[in-house]
Image (cartoon, helix red, strand yellow):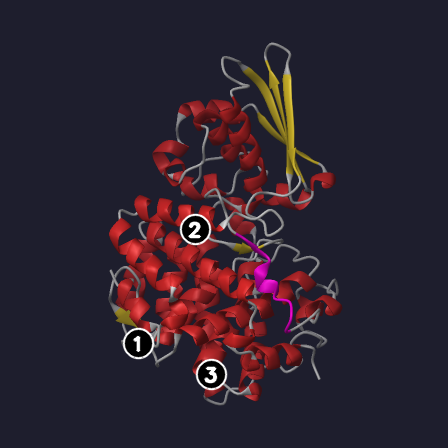
Amino acid sequence: MDIIEPLIEHLLDVRYEAIPEKTIEQTRMSILDTFGVLQAGKGAPGCDELIGLVKFWGGRAESTILLDGDKIPAPNAALANAVMCRALDFDSATAGKGCHLDASVIPVALAISEKGEIAGREFIAAITAAKDLAARINAATKQYYGFDPTICCGIFATTAVAARLLGLNFRQTHHALGMALNEASGTFQSNIDGALSVRLNQGMAALKGIICAELALRGYTGVTNVIQGLCGYANLIARGHFDSDVLLEDLGNSYFSDRNLFKRWPSCGGTLAATDLAVEVARSGRLDGKALSEIVVFLSKGVAALVGSDFKLGETPAVNAQFSVQYAIANALLRKDSLLIHFTEPYVKDQEIMNMISKIHVKIDEKVASGARLEIKCADGTAIVTEAEILRGHYLNPLSREEILGKYSENISFSNRVERGRAIQEQVMHLEKLDDVSLLVRSLEN
């Protein structure tokens, strides 16, 4: 017996009524947050090109390309929709290790919902249980060694939600997750290099999750020793640095899907604590009229490896900015904010930003863990030192419900979809009352 089996049982057996209300609310906010970044992200670099490609491929009209309206095969629709959800890097993530689940899991659930009538309660329960399964694998994984957990671990969430909503039984779901192990891949080098393939990983997790579930439904077999096999997840991906006790900790009572990070700022999670600090200092007025000589940001080794390289403009400046703590700090100090528009090409290329970036240096300090420390040195000899142990939006330092709703409002305003966005918000707020989730898809067709 592989340790994945109790997780499969919980995935398939848990009902909406058994899930704590706080967890239901967390899932509801995750769905709304994802719809917000989807609407804001449609026109981001790479999205139109991918949508054009999946339309060119054509195929059976199963599931909708959101905000477009055309129907294509479900895996390809999920691919395109997940990429749009991740395009601005403003989507939520599982706190710790950079595992973005919502931007893949929710598009998969929507794509499957168009294949058969699925009630709102089942939609919420399936997403919650699937995220819990993958978030537990993510928490048990002590190190990813350069793999991107969004696809490497996230594919278990997309496969799980597809398996449940397609009605797979225990054996079929086990095989589907075994096939997902074969597809667990992806590298953080995309993030470091500022490549569009960052968001493609999000889409591939969605596409492959549906394929794994569909194949298992048709009798395909997959790995059975998914976690503990000689070449299973724990040994192959985590290289033995895997805590099996965490995997089953309080299963059925505590939901690891609650351990979410709702982003306050539109950039990589590794930049957010430093952005918090820079915005706070800039708005305080303590730098008014002062010339800055040097800014040092202290990050953990892992975070610095992801976002701490010297800023360079590449082929996709928006992505370069999203994954640069130097840009995040310079932007926050100069503009006293961090908005979606600040991560568009004209703003990224601003010479005043480039001048500020030249003064920013990154240093390693493992004591800051998932936070950051900022030291700002002024030309007059004075200095400001500020530190954040836990970034805002982390489940241990969460955004309020009102702040998440405010973020949604910002996203629909950015996309010029205020009226339609409000109608979608109303549906999500009463999602458990929907008899057929495909009604929600219709609101997102264009």
Question: Residue 277 lies in magenta, yes or no?
Answer: no
Q: Residues within 10 Å of mark 2 (few under 14, many from 20)?
A: many
User: Height in image: 215 above or below 306?
Assistant: below
User: Residue 183 location in percent, x, y?
Assistant: 54, 70
In this picture, residue 366 sits left or right of residue 339: right
Residue at figure coordinates x 57%, y 63% from the top left: 257
The tally of labels here is: 3
Which comes sooner in the sequence, label 3 or label 1? 1
Magenta segment:
252-261
Question: Which residue is the site of mark 3?
Answer: 215
Q: Secondary structure at mark 1?
A: loop
In this picture, residue 272 sits left or right of residue 422: right
Residue at figure coordinates x 60%, y 21% from the top left: 294
Contact flag, marks 2 and 3 (Cβ < 8 Å):
no
Which of 309/391 is in front?
391
Question: Which residue is the site of mark 1?
Answer: 62
Point out the frontmost of discs 3 and 1: 1
Amino acid type indicated by mark 2? Leu
